[in-house]
């Protein structure tokens, strides 16, 4: 039986053939590091990385490609921003919808560096009210950190409105685009974000272990590098280079990952973000409409394909989330994510923390309507089995 993969919020699968082909071509034909040699393959590798940086800049509406910093993933990007910018006495505003890749660094910095954090609550549908963010601003506030799209409910947050608030108060604005990059139009200038953290392996369809941090103009003057090492530039000096992107890209690049990410980004560009949004909206609505008809299924979050993006969290009466996920996979080959999804405060707000979280189904660009219909049918059978 063919697997029905509905865990795209964790990582997209399957990857486009173009992504796999590009990675294999690099490994077989080039296999060289960038910035470390003058032979033909090394020079071509450097050119490929520069083109990848330019393409990622295009997707984020960024003209200066050197402001695209390659990282080990979205978590790495967020850590670079948070550890590199926050100082003792700073106040940060974030939300209960955040992933642990924001919550844990902030907790660490509270305990070790003396920052303070306000975690703004969300409404019953999982959406943040911009006025609540505005009211949380203090004289020591330095940064607002926002999860653009919830990895639990798929709720799309009012990122533009919150960006305007940040601009009005001259605050740094860090956007976690883990679930929105490659799915929504993310333009740094429109969002008002000086920092955007992006994973390569989700909506951009690249491999695991690669991501991007956009660093806006002037931010590098304040953003300390907390990782130092070889960059292939100014090797005679044991000080870390100040120029971008070298300041934040110590060590040998993950070239296979960058190559795959560039191919995934190209696939997204050719498909078009408007077409991708339309496809995901249709699949989300198909999933939501089917789930609403199943007795014993509770849907958390907006419950509206216009207000959420490809992610739906549910509870199935009579089943622990892990039991439900195991039963779906075992009997129907439907693959979903049970549990807390690394977002404990979001589950606390939903009232699902003490019951083991939710069963999360997340669609991707390469999912088909027939797969959604089959998953809904499987869940209906599962719910009926619990009711006897």
Image: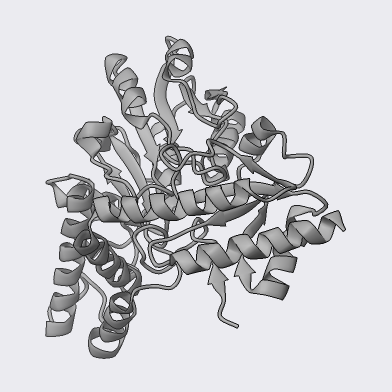
Instruction: Let me know if residue 227 appears in the view.
Output: no
Residue 285, given in percent of the width and then of the height, sits at 47, 49
Residue 295, given in percent of the width and then of the height, sits at 72, 48
Q: Is residue 102 above or below residue 145?
A: below
Going by the picture, which residue comes out furthest to the right?
A: 388
Instruction: Let me know if residue 223 appears in the view.
Output: yes
Residue 176, given in percent of the width and then of the height, sits at 41, 42
Q: Is residue 20 above or below residue 186?
A: below
Q: Which residue is at 52% across, 25% downward?
A: 115
Quarter of the image where the C terminus is located: bottom right
Q: Is residue 280 above or below residue 141?
A: below
Q: Which residue is at 37% across, 60% downward?
A: 200
Q: Is residue 75 left or right of residue 180?
A: right
**Nearest to the observer: residue 40 or residue 98:** 98
Q: Is residue 378 left or right of residue 73?
A: right
**Nearest to the observer: residue 149 or residue 163:** 149
Q: Is residue 326 left or right of residue 247?
A: right
Q: Is residue 239 above or below residue 264?
A: above
Q: Quadrant of residue 165?
A: top left
**Nearest to the observer: residue 346 or residue 107:** 346
Quarter of the image where the N terminus is located: bottom right
Going by the picture, which residue comes out furthest to the bottom?
A: 28
Q: How is the image coloured?
A: one colour
Residue 99, given in percent of the width and then of the height, sits at 54, 43
Q: How many marks?
A: 0
Going by the picture, which residue comes out furthest to the front?
A: 293
């Amino acid at each position: 039986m063919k697997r029905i993969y509905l865990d795209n919020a964790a990582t997209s699968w399957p990857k486009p053939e173009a992504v796999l082909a590009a990675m294999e071509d690099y490994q077989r034909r080039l296999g060289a590091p960038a910035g470390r040699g003058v032979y033909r393959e090394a020079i071509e590798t450097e050119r490929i990385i520069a083109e990848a940086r330019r393409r990622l800049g295009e997707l984020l509406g960024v003209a200066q490609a050197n402001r695209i910093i390659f990282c080990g993933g979205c978590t790495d990007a967020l850590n670079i921003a948070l550890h590199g910018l926050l100082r003792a006495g700073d106040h940060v505003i974030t939300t209960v919808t955040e992933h642990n890749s924001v919550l844990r660094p902030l907790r660490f910095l509270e305990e070790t560096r003396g920052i303070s954090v306000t975690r703004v609550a969300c409404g019953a549908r999982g959406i943040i009210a911009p006025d609540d963010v505005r009211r949380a601003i203090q004289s020591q506030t330095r940064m607002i950190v926002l999860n653009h799209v919830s990895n639990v409910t798929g709720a799309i947050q009012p990122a533009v409105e919150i960006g305007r608030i940040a601009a009005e108060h001259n605050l740094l604005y860090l956007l976690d685009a883990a679930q929105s990059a490659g799915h929504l139009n993310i333009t740094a200038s429109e969002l008002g974000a000086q920092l955007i953290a992006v994973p390569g392996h989700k909506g951009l369809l690249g491999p695991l272990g690669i991501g991007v941090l956009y660093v806006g103009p002037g931010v590098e003057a304040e953003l300390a590098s907390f990782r130092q090492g070889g960059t292939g530039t100014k090797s005679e000096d044991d000080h870390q280079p100040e120029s971008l992107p070298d300041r934040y890209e110590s060590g040998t690049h993950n070239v296979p990952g960058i190559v795959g990410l560039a191919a995934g980004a190209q696939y997204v560009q050719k498909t078009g973000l408007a077409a991708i949004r339309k496809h995901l909206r249709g699949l989300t609505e198909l999933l939501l409409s089917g789930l609403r008809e199943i007795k014993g299924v509770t849907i958390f979050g907006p419950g509206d394909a216009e207000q959420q993006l490809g992610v739906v969290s549910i509870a199935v009466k009579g089943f622990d989330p892990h039991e439900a996920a195991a039963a779906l996979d075992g009997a129907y080959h439907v693959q979903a994510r049970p549990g807390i999804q690394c977002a404990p405060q979001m589950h606390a707000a939903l009232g699902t923390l003490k019951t083991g979280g939710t069963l999360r189904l997340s669609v991707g660009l390469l999912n088909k309507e027939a797969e959604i219909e089959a998953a809904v049918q499987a869940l209906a059978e599962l719910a009926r089995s619990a009711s006897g």
